[in-house]
């Protein structure tokens, strides 16, 4: 991956919850026009009955204390009987109070690109309150194309392709890895804009080449259809669901398609489906900018003496100084850093690290502060390590595909090799399939100045990141107000200082749902439930367990 391509991927990772995007040309439709909810029961379709009729065969997971299974869903819901399928890992943690068990509580941890089954095995059930864990089996699944899904998305060549690459191509690739300059956070010149567009095009072409025909079938609406098949396979008449961040988009889509199959639904860290791609950039990038300002203002409350400046002004100046340095030349890192092969951290990587540290201030502000100090002194190794996450393997179960597809549809092919971590590929694929993007580069350049005014480099980097979707396969979703007639009251949770899914979007989403409820968490960081606030836990658990409504204006 050359530096331009890598910069695009990094920026998309930073703005993951943002752009839920598809790539079609022409004028955007009226955002006020909501799509009509589905009226036909998919389970009654003869070509879907084999999928709805399957039962999960649970076996012990590789991780003690969890059970695993696999769910088969059609690759293409327009042609579900053609034999082409996704096989999705599913995991569950049994209710801790089995005598009081209500049923299954399905969750999505976010992304797009986060693997629910793997997250559960890593202890995600501990994010739920004791009352919810006692009454529900906590169930996670890897969405189509994600994690251990078969097939799975990838934007990188298989190892054998890399090994067979001719020496001449290797030399050319190596030359591309070391360009004369670095990508700016605000591409102002024609040369910088051409390079950004070319890098985005290359990223899209790589995904098309290596993921091919499944790219058009990993959108959120199809994932929501899978969620309904999972509901049926779990033996649940109605779905109890909790989605964080991107999981709110998945839940919203489910509520629109299957409103009368919802028992209870919590959407925490909400994404407003009525925003177009440009509005999303401005919304989220402004959220990150506010959060970095919060860090400068409130660093001493959490990080104490470790703060990289004595005043908010000193902290802001240090961060700005690092961005400027990294635009001139990558910041130095140690040889064992993941950024060493790129010659250090460029400005996009620095912005990525700073922004990602805004997600959980209680955990990340202290290490961020130390990393910023060291980066300012000439060593960005710790700053680069902030974003490093332990890779979760795709081997979530020890059971075989055949054992786990009781009553499943025929036609599942021999599974191809699954990448160890395809989160970035899945993030890009879903983001570029869910909301229209213009094909011409001009709208992106036109958006730069407003984005700069609204959010500085966080806005301009966000606009540039959207360029990948310009060359992506088209999806059918459009920005729209929620249409979910018949859905019971849905609980939306919004954090006032959320960097990634700004509070205003939670307010808007709650208003769009019939009888929608809003729970406000006055705090910093991304999402609220599962981060230790007793008030939030109590109200969400009371809703999930007892269907207790949250009063208007409820605040924690």
Image (cartoon, grey):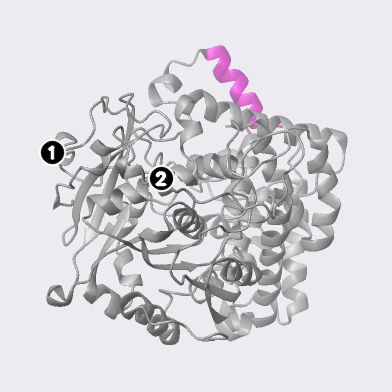
Q: Where, quadrant-wise, is the N terminus in this rendering?
A: top right
Residue 369 at x, y percent in the picture: 60, 71
Query: Which quarter of the figure has residue 481?
Result: bottom right
Q: Is residue 437 magenta?
A: no
Residue 236 at x, y percent in the picture: 25, 59
Write down the residue under mark 1.
403
State left or right for residue 53 relative to residue 231.
left
Residue 444 at x, y percent in the picture: 78, 42
Secondary structure of residue under mark 2: loop
Residue 366 at x, y percent in the picture: 54, 74
Return the disc, 1 or 2, that comes first in the chain's sequence.
Answer: 2
Tell me if mark 1 has few (under 14), some (14-19) or many (20+) residues whose alpha carbon lies within 10 angstroms of its own: few
Secondary structure of residue under mark 1: helix
Q: Residue at x 67, y 45 (%)?
A: 465
- On residue 435, the disc is none
Q: Residue at x 56, y 65 (%)?
A: 357
Name the chief secondary structure element in magenta: helix
Mark 1 or 2: the one toward you: 2
Q: Residue at x 60, y 53 (%)?
A: 14
Residue 83 visible in the snapshot: yes
Write down the residue under mark 2.
40
Q: Looking at the picture, does residue 313 appear above or below residue 411? A: below
Front in this rendered view, residue 7 or 35: 35
Front in this rendered view, residue 243 or 204: 243
Q: Looking at the picture, does residue 106 appear above or below residue 30? A: below
Residue 108 visible in the snapshot: no
Q: Which residues are magenta?
A: 167-180
Q: CA distance from mark 1 to mark 2?
A: 32 Å
Tell me if mark 2 has few (under 14), some (14-19) or many (20+) residues whose alpha carbon lies within 10 angstroms of its own: few
Q: Is residue 176 magenta?
A: yes
């Amino acid at each position: 991956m050359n530096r331009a391509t890598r910069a695009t991927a990094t920026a998309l990772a930073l703005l993951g919850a943002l752009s839920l995007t598809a790539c079609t040309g022409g004028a955007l439709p009226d955002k006020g026009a909501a799509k009509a909810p589905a009226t036909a029961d998919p389970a009654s379709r003869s070509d879907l009955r084999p999928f709805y009729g399957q039962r999960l065969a649970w076996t012990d997971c590789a991780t003690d204390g969890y059970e695993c299974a696999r769910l088969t869903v059609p690759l293409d819901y327009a042609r579900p009987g053609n034999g082409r399928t996704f096989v999705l890992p599913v995991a569950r943690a049994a209710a801790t109070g089995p005598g009081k068990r209500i049923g299954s509580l399905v969750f999505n941890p976010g992304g797009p690109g986060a693997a629910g089954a793997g997250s559960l095995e890593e202890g995600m059930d501990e994010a739920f309150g004791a009352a919810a864990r006692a009454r529900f089996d906590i169930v996670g699944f890897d969405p189509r194309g994600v994690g251990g899904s078969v097939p799975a998305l990838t934007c990188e060549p298989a190892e054998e392709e890399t090994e067979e690459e001719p020496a001449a191509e290797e030399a050319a690739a190596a030359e591309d890895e070391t360009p004369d300059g670095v990508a700016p956070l605000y591409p102002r010149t024609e040369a910088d804009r051409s390079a950004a567009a070319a890098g985005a095009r290359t990223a899209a072409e790589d995904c098309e080449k290596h993921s091919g025909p499944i790219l058009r079938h990993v959108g959120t609406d199809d994932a929501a259809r899978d969620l309904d098949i999972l509901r049926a396979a779990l033996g649940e008449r109605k779905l109890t669901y909790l989605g964080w961040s991107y999981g709110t988009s998945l839940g919203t889509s489910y509520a629109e398609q299957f409103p009368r199959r919802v028992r209870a639904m919590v959407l925490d860290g909400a994404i407003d489906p009525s925003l177009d791609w440009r509005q999303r950039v401005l919304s989220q990038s402004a959220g990150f900018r506010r959060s970095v300002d919060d860090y400068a203002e409130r660093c001493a409350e959490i990080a104490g003496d470790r703060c990289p400046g004595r005043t908010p002004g000193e902290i802001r100046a240090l961060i700005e100084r690092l961005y400027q340095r990294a635009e001139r030349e990558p910041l130095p890192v140690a040889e064992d850093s993941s950024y060493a092969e790129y010659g250090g951290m460029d400005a996009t990587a620095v912005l990525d690290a700073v922004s990602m540290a805004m997600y959980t201030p209680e955990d990340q502000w202290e290490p961020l502060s130390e990393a910023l100090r060291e980066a300012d002194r000439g060593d960005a190794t710790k700053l680069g390590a902030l974003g490093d996450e332990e890779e979760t393997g795709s081997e979530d179960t020890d059971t075989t595909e055949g054992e786990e597809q009781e009553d499943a549809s025929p036609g599942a092919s021999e599974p191809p090799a699954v990448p160890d971590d395809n989160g970035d590929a899945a993030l890009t694929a879903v983001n570029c399939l869910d909301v229209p993007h213009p094909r011409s580069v001009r709208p992106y350049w036109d958006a730069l100045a407003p984005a700069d005014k609204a959010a500085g480099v966080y806005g301009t980097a966000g606009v540039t990141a959207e360029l990948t979707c310009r060359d992506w396969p088209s999806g059918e979703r459009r920005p729209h107000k929620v249409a979910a007639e018949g859905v019971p009251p849905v609980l939306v949770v919004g954090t006032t200082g959320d960097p990634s899914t700004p509070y205003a979007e939670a307010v808007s989403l709650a208003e769009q749902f019939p009888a929608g409820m809003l729970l406000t968490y006055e705090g910093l960081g991304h999402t609220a439930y599962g981060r230790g606030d007793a008030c939030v836990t109590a109200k969400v658990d009371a809703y999930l367990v007892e269907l207790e409504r949250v009063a208007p204006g409820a605040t924690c």
